[in-house]
Image: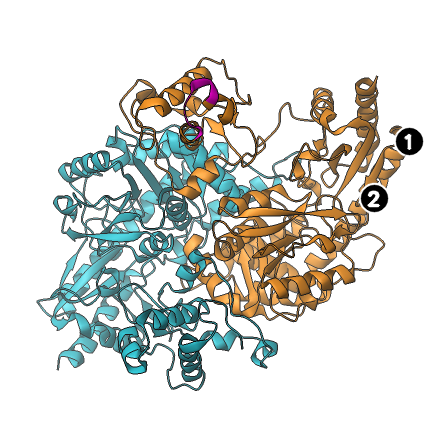
Chain colours: A cyan, B orange
């Protein structure tokens, strides 16, 4: 690591690079610490801010810093140096890694630690589902049958996914989501995250703008931003995206939305706003990515048809997933595409990874065709409604009277607002809860500007992996932690 | 589809667009036909070549044409119009799809039809493996055990892959490939194709050059080219890549190589050339992607250690797959990365699709740990050696004396050269064989310039999915087709 590639091969940039590397190595700047602001450091060292920025970009590309537009750079956790092999660490002269522009953006993407520690005894982790909810018996039977089914040989399968699964999905989407599509419009993907990534790659160029719900789903925002596009944050209220605030002057190329159940605030987008969103997309010639991530879970409410079902203009990419009804570890989802996007998405899927695993696709097809999948979803909906009711009761019973929840009509999580605390108290509250074995998650990181506005503290509580009996103990611990925090 | 987005909203470009659309629609230009050259059409219509090119790009973006750098545009097969829904076809005014630059390149990527028809009775399809070779019993037992294993909840798994699988792979790679790596350097991917795609995205920018074996693996070339990078073709001889021909003046950012068993010609790169390749990469500050796609299958020959095993400079990304030893339908492979690339590849994998399916990873880990995987590979190697021997005997017995094969020391395919035919006779030969139920595949499309040079006709014969008893009948049919073709 002695030599550096351009643009900071020598001079002031190199000295800044070496300085920060040394401070990270000796712990002066520990993991998670804020690096000096580029403005301040440039002034201190009497060099141009561009020089400092280039050094920071190099450090980010190498994994020493994590940077994110508009925020202070922080020391990566764990520092990249920890992963360096003995040979390189021993000082062999070697240029810094040369990454693509995309690679540098990815390296600089700020993502939460993969698994917070210590493990929580009662974990309201959003996205997790209960192991006992998985239909293991039905899955195993169907899997064995498919494993024994004769194929002349094992060769690559079609990129768009297995024909039987796409046909089964077509019927399911018509029955469950009011969505009339052709099986040819469906492309099976490796979970919704791949659906988002394919949309990002095929529909956005560096410098493009995309509309993003504020607050919204961070893994989608990061994926779109990694293409070099920039987010236009549009506010969300109790009904979902505030379509009156959609950009009129600025041109956006894509809007990512969660109309069935806004993530995280839980609004269900009314038909008037749906029409307004579609009209906006037509005027802007923009694509809409409709992430129906938990559309199966609606309680005491008539389902609203998918946005794509009322799109007469072929602008909506609909995205569904099996992560909530089966398992997020399975990595299976699907896109329903406007017909004219079908060829390029198939081609991109083939180049990206050829196709989704075939055996699992056929097992799913068999379960949907035979009706077992929909019976399972109905059972699971009742189970999750029980969990939701128990959680809401526990909140009402154990937390202060000003605590209130949003987004309870659908889905597998709620947002709990705590007006007795300020937004900046969230990290302390979350850490104190975790020290007591309770996993809760702050809402602020889901906002475009984490520190902006005058919001109270808020928590995202995912309840799909917990037992009904865990809700009250969980809220009792939270109430106790909260009492200490506000004392 | 009445209106068009810029740059061909009106005028000459629009007329050219409409003309070609109409000719494709009415069959004047059938699927697969060459479109007029942009030069000729510009001259005929007295417009600038830029205008014609813009219209062609639009047609390619919409899926009507397939274009490829330096080749004539062809009508897509099937034409995109076939996939258009009734509503759009009915003439609703609607702009053409707006794709990213990457999307337009993907739409314009020329790929072979997914599954040639009619299905062959004896199919030498490269990449297919025999259904009966899959260790279904061992797999099913391990799968059931994993399905029943308790997890506190089902939540997202680490992007780099399951820890147990990475540890098992570390041991396997040391025993089988002489590769000493740390489990932390391994990232489990969705088949080698995703490994290639991640390298393309993270290591190449538009306009960069990459070294590519000529002939080489087309799915890798297309993936690298889709980033906007350009291939520098380097010739291959019986020993693999001719390292003396590596570019010295031009700067390349990456080299994609198959040193264990060159695809398709089968050379095993000698140690001298390996060292030369590594020295070249160091001088150029280039990355090397080492695709060890069939490294398990070597016959009567001492295994050569992986290139990464002798790389002291941290420049080699090693890529392995389970497609050959288990099934290409499973979509599981892995990268062994230079330590400093680990953080960015993990981050990119998380953004691309979160992680590989967890259950299948744990089944694989259990099979490797328990020794069942390596016993299976040994059995499979003997089985494929029998297939290879039977194929070589059948070629010697039934084909003319001048027919000869290359690349037989390793792998699951051979290249059969037929000096009695010219290269341009390949498509006719392949079609005639298929009409008789025999699947064989031309070698020319694997060359950088399909029509260049004075090569005889050649066929790629993959034998891993066939029974020993099918080799002689297959070669008898080929001999008969060949006799007709050369009559």
Q: Quadrant of residue B466?
A: top right
Q: How many marks?
A: 2
- The disc, 1 or 2, on the residue closer to the chain's N-terminal end is 2
The answer to which of A261 and B95 lies nearer the viewer is B95
> Considering the image in quadrants, where does the C terminus of chain A appear?
bottom left
Q: Position of residue A299 (x, y in %)?
A: 22, 46
- The residue nearer to you, when weighing A316 against B272, is B272
Q: Nearer the viewer, residue B304 or B19?
A: B19
Identify the residue under disc 1: B401
Label 2 marks a residue whose chain is B
Query: Horizontal placement of B443 versus A35: left or right?
Result: right
Provide the residue designation for mark 2.
B386
> Badge 1: how crowded within 10 Å, few (<14), some, or many (20+)?
few
Tell me if B332 is positioned left or right of A11 in this view: right
A329 relative to A279, above or below: below
Q: Are marks 1 and 2 in contact (CB under 8 Å)?
A: no
Q: Is residue B46 magenta?
A: yes
Mark 2 is surrounded, within 10 Å at the Cα level, by few (under 14), some (14 to 19) or many (20 or more) other residues, namely some
**Callout 2: SS:** helix
Task: State the image coordinates of residue A40 (x, y, percent, origin top left).
Answer: 26, 78
Quarter occupied by residue B85: top left
* In-image side of A194 versus B418 (left or right): left
Instruction: For marks 1 and 2, give the one nearer the viewer.
Output: 1
B320 drawn magenta = no
Q: Chain of mark 1?
A: B
Residues in magenta, as a range: B43-49
Q: CA distance from mark 1 to mark 2?
A: 23 Å
The residue positioned 15% from the left and 44% from the top of the image is A243
Mark number, residue A334: none
């Amino acid at each position: 690591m002695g030599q550096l590639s351009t643009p900071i091969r020598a001079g002031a940039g190199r000295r800044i690079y070496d300085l920060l590397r040394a401070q990270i190595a000796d712990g002066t700047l520990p993991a998670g610490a804020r690096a000096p602001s580029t403005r301040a450091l440039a002034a201190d060292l009497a060099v141009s801010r561009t020089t400092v920025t280039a050094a920071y970009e190099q450090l980010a590309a190498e994994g020493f810093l994590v940077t994110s537009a508009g925020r202070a750079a922080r020391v990566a956790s764990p520092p990249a140096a920890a992963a360096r092999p003995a040979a390189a660490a021993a000082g062999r002269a070697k240029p810094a890694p040369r990454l693509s522009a995309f690679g540098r953006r990815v390296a600089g993407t700020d993502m939460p630690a993969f698994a917070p520690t210590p493990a929580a005894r009662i974990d309201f982790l959003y996205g997790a589902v209960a192991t006992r909810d998985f239909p293991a018996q039905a899955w195993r039977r169907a899997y064995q049958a498919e494993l024994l089914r004769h194929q002349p040989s094992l060769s690559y399968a079609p990129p768009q996914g297995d024909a039987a699964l796409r046909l089964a999905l077509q019927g399911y989407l018509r029955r469950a989501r009011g969505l009339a599509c052709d099986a040819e419009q469906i492309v099976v993907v490796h979970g919704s995250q791949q659906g988002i990534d394919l949309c990002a790659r095929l529909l956005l160029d560096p410098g493009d703008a995309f509309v993003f719900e504020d607050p919204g789903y961070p893994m989608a925002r990061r994926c779109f931003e990694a293409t070099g596009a920039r987010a236009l944050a549009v506010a969300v209220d109790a009904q979902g995206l505030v379509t009156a605030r959609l950009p009129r002057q600025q041109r956006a190329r894509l809007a990512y939305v969660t109309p069935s159940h806004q993530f995280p605030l839980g609004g269900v987008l009314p038909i008037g706003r749906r029409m307004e969103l579609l009209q906006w997309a037509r005027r802007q010639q923009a694509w809409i990515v409709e992430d129906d991530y938990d559309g199966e879970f609606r309680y005491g409410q008539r389902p609203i048809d998918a946005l794509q079902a009322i799109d007469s203009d072929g602008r909506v990419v609909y995205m569904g997933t099996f992560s909530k009804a089966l398992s997020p570890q399975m990595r299976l989802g699907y896109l329903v595409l406007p017909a004219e996007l079908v060829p390029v998405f198939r081609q991109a899927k083939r180049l990206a990874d050829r196709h989704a695993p075939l055996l699992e696709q056929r097992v799913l097809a068999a379960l949907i065709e035979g009706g077992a999948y929909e019976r399972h979803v109905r059972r699971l909906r009742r189970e999750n409604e029980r969990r939701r009711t128990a959680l809401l009761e526990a909140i009402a019973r154990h937390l202060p009277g000003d605590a209130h929840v949003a987004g309870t009509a659908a889905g597998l999580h709620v947002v709990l607002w705590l007006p007795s605390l300020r937004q900046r108290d969230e990290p302390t509250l979350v850490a104190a809860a975790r020290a007591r074995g309770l996993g809760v998650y702050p809402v602020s990181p889901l906002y475009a500007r984490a520190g902006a506005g005058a919001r109270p503290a808020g928590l995202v509580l995912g309840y799909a992996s917990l037992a009904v009996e865990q809700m009250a103990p969980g809220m009792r611990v939270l109430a106790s932690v909260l009492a200490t925090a506000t004392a």
